[in-house]
Amino acid sequence: MLSAIFLMLLALSLAQAQFRSEEANPKVANWSGRYFSTFYLIEDTPRGFKEFDSISVEYLPNQENDERLLIPDRHGNIPTLGRLTTKNQTSYKFKKSKLIEGGRLIKLSFVTEIVDGISYSFKGEYLRYDKEIRKGDSIIGYVHLKGNLTKYKDGRRVAQAKLDLTPHWIE
């Protein structure tokens, strides 16, 4: 009887330790839908980015159906596809992009292709718990991804802003 109780307590302790480990070190494969989505601004468009509409983080082919393709390399990197889209529907495909595991938050980094001399880069992180944004008594959205977006014209930085983004599936 005592050994059964001891085994139950040991199992409970191991389960709690694993939960704490996943909380301290989140894994993309555990909830990939949280990281792959289209993200929009919650508040007003920052100066220098009046044309900005959204950022879409997309799976590589077969990645959505095979969790093994969401396992990071030894540096914590998971390759992705995606694009930044403007209000006039110009699409800037990601030239380099990755989710980064290792630490308290999953990070996103990308650089876009150049279209008519314009390109973008982004470095940000997914919040563990969505942050509520209010105007007065009204909730206007929830921040899910935040980071720094930089705009380049002919290779020179022309604008930079901190963005608070919400995925399309949060209303």
Image (tube, grey):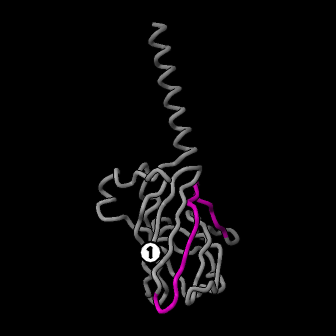
Q: Residue 127: within the magenta?
A: yes
- Residue name at image x 47 percent, y 63 percent: 98
- Residue name at image x 51 percent, y 81 percent: 53
- Residue name at image x 54 percent, y 83 percent: 52
Query: How many numbered callouts?
Result: 1
Q: Position of residue 47 (x, y in %)?
A: 66, 85
Who is closer to the viewer here, 95 or 83?
95
In the current view of this chain or complex, which residue is farthest to the right?
Answer: 136
Q: Quadrant of the N terminus?
A: top left
Label 1: element kind:
strand
Who is closer to the viewer here, 152 or 19?
152
Q: Position of residue 99 (x, y in %)?
A: 48, 60
Characterize the magenta stretch by its predominant secondary structure.
strand
In the current view of this chain or complex, which residue is farthest to the top?
Answer: 1
Who is closer to the viewer here, 74 or 32?
74
Residue type at mark 1? Phe
Q: Quadrant of residue 134?
A: bottom right
- Residue name at image x 43 percent, y 48 percent: 30
Q: Is residue 27 left or right of residue 24?
A: left
In the image, residue 22 sits, relative to residue 106, either above or below, namely above
Q: Position of residue 36 (x, y in %)?
A: 43, 63
Q: Quadrant of residue 154?
A: bottom right
Who is closer to the viewer here, 44 or 88?
88
Q: Which residue is mark 1?
A: 94
Q: Residue 117: within the magenta?
A: yes
Q: Which residues are magenta?
A: 115-134
Q: Quadrant of residue 133?
A: bottom right
In the image, residue 164 sits, relative to residue 116, either above or below, namely above
